[in-house]
Image: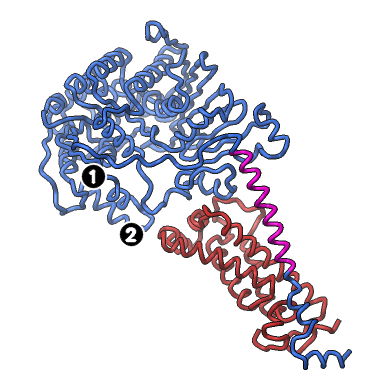
Amino acid sequence: MTAYMNEQTPLSGRQATWLVLLRVAIGWHFLYEGLVKVFNPSWSPLGYLMDSKGIFAPLFTAMASNPTVLGAVDFLNQWGLVLIGLGLILGVFTRWATAAGMLLLVFYYLSHPPFPGLNYALPSEGSYFFIDKVFIEFLALGVLLRFPTGRIIGIDRLIFGKNHKNL
Amino acid sequence: MEENKKQEENQGITRRDVVRGLATVPVLGAVAYGLYKKKNLDRYLKHSISEELGMSAGEPAHPPKSEGREIRIGLIGFGIRGKQLAKGLGFAHPSQVEEWRKAAEENKNDYRYLDFRSQEDLNIRITAVCDVFDTYGERARETAANIHREGSGGPMGEPVKRYANYKELIASPEVDAVVIATPDHWHGPMTIEAARAGKHVYCEKPLTWSVEETYEVRKAVVESGVVFQLGHQGRQTDAYLKAREAIEKNVLGPVNLIEVTTNRNDPNGAWVYDIHKEANEATIDWEQFIGQAPWHDFSLERFFRWRCWWDYSTGLSGDLLTHEYDAINQILNVGIPHSAMSTGGIYFFKDGRTVPDVLTTVFEFPEKNLSLLYSATLSSQMDRGKRVMGHDAYMEMGSTLTIYADPRSTRYADKIKKGIIKPDMPIYSYIPGRGADTITSATERYFAGRGLLYTYRGGKRVDTTHLHLKEWLDAIRQGKQTSCDIHNGFEEAMTAHMGTLSYHHKKQVFWDKESESIIV
């Protein structure tokens, strides 16, 4: 019960277990989203960006309209997803991966805000009112940032040691 | 216990650290294994389906650059369509180019300027123009002289001659070929005149306004040997080319019913065009406009909105059904139907027009075991697409092409049973600019269906009208066939006339193959 307790992460074993499960699950989601795009050579974020709505929509459609920017966005998105996924699953550079994941989710949320009155080409599988699954995943990563587990279960433990303060 | 823990901390990395540090690595193995299995299954499904269908994956190749001698073009008619055809040829009025340039500056997604500037040079010159409305005639002259595709104030080419009468334009030794974009009742006489003068013809659809002149037009074109292209630019639509391939490869099985539609809902779509403020009896050659039509006193409404009157127009049948019919004729070679039956009426635009705004026509092709149903409305935009229903699969044609297997298909029964083909997933889907695929993600189909995937392609999209004109010009230079030649045009016109005659006579009309005539 007290096995994982220490000064930096005063977590019980069960608490840590659930947090690690959450971290690995989100990592799995990111990794798979990334790999699907990496393995599909014709994948393009064009349609997704063009479908954005809300006050930030012009920013996202502008990204789509410039082929160079679009290519860069595509590359960063794909490999960002893969690296963040690996980071979260393996618990390597966990806090960086968590923060980067939150940043990506902010982009997804702002490009497709689930606000009433905004309709998207792609219908969603559920009903969302301001809060959607992107937002909840973002909050979950926020929790993981506050309660880091990379040094408990994760490669960070081997790199930085379980008592390193900054990770 | 406390003792142990202290010991571990002092020792640096312990066995326990390694175990805990690498505890989640097997998860990666699970992702990789799962992904590998899934990819294999996807590949197997895709391969099984594409092997079954035998459809090509690539996009239709872009035709090679137009080479050979310069062709001198005469433009007859410079209204809405005339302007679009000039643009397809590479000519636009400086003020129009200026407008596109400004629009592009303000909105980076507006590619009209870039598209126009990068459109292939067809190696032609517009040497003569003609329009019965002075303002349009002058605009045509200025457009034809804008050889550098510049905006206002840019360098212009030599002034181009405007002819008062189309006959003079056709007779001019400066003209090798004509592009006809006049009201329907002028298509026949002008094509005949041009063909007899040995001038090649690109004519807007429909081929003719009356049944009688249809024979004359065909005779004149065939006898003269000029290269003729009817303006159904849908012949260049890549999704239609893929649809034809699907028919040729019998992907759909027996096709017994096809549904095509027109769905418009705005005054412009109902031919209620703006009346130009400079237009009046002094600026319009009314007598020349009337031509073979019954005499009517000068009317600005009739001049600009001529499509609303049978006197000059062929109505929904000639104007919009012909696009749908030609698309089907292109993929299935249906020819002229055995019979036609139309009903409809003027139900929404009660503005004095004589042509209906709602029309339903059923064409029968008993030799092909096929019914073609056309239904049109000018007061609803509900998109119903073109649906080709086969026993084994059905296909939706538009700018994209999607084919679904029929759950009760005979041909695909085995693969459906094995779960390889899923009737709710397309077995083939073609998206311009994205190529063809057996299974596209639902996401991509949603985006494509809304024009989000191919509308903004960095200026790489090509105007089908441009391609259709290019094909005609290349055919002139190389003595080749056009894709919508005089025989396709004859079929198109007769089919449209059958629909119209049935509407007028309120009864089914028939095509007599032997005598090549419509029996009312």
Q: Which mark is residue B106?
A: 2
Q: Which chain is red?
A: A
Which range is magenta?
A: B26-50
Which of the two discs, 2 and 1, labels the residue nearer the N terminus?
1
Identity of the residue drawn at 49% across and 45% down? B435
> Where is residue B52, by image quadrant?
top right
Q: Which residue is mark 1?
A: B92
- In this view of the protein, which residue sits in the foreground, B79 or A13? A13
Name which quarter of the figure residue B420 lies in. top right
- Give whichever of B317, B481 is nearer the camera: B481
Amino acid type, label 1: Ala
Check if residue B38 falls in the magenta segment: yes
The residue at the point 64 percent across, 31 percent down is B406
Number of residues whose C-alpha sits closer than 10 Å to that of mark 2, classed few (under 14), some (14–19) or many (20 or more): few
Tell me if residue B190 comes above or below residue B453 in the rendering. Answer: above
Q: Residue B355 occupies which quadrant of the picture?
A: top left
**Label 2 to label 1: alpha-carbon separation:** 20 Å
Name the element at disc 1.
loop
- Residue B520 in sight here: no
